[in-house]
Amino acid sequence: MKESATYFKWLAILCGILLLFSVGILAVGYQDITLFRAALVVAFLVGTVAFIFLARRKSR
């Protein structure tokens, strides 16, 4: 596995963990949903998918 693929894999894992944490906070009701928080969840989702795609592309 190339170094960049490993780097992208860890970034995908980090974004995924932050995504789950953000969704969990919103699901429990600890904080209300605002436009900023919804945009943050979407950004983490896009980041996770993009980094997974890049990791798989670089590993080939």
Image (tube, rainbow, N blue to C red):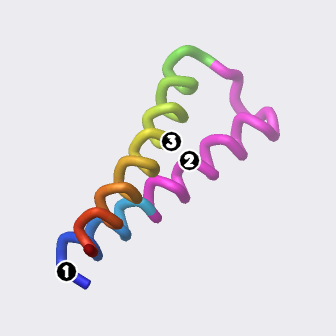
Residue depicted at x 55% and y 58%: 17
Q: Residue at x 29, y 57 (%)?
A: 54
| Amino acid at the residue labelled 3 | Leu
Callout 2 secondary element: helix
Q: Which residue is mark 2?
A: 19
Q: CA distance from mark 2 to mark 3?
A: 6 Å
Residue furthest out toward the top: 35
Sequence-first disc among 2 and 3: 2
Which span is picked out in magenta? 13-33
Residues 4 and 10: in front is 4
Q: Nearer the viewer, residue 47 or 55?
A: 55
As drawn, the label of residue 45 is 3
Q: Position of residue 47 (x, y in %)?
A: 39, 45
Give neighbour class at mark 1: few <14, some 14-19, many 20+ (Cα, 10 Å).
few
Asked if residue 14 lies in the magenta stretch, the reply is yes
Residue topped by disc 1: 2
Camera-side mark, 1 or 3: 1
* Residue positioned most to the front: 60
Residue 59 image-quadrant placement: bottom left
Q: CA distance from mark 1 to mark 3?
A: 24 Å
Q: Main secondary structure of the magenta part?
A: helix
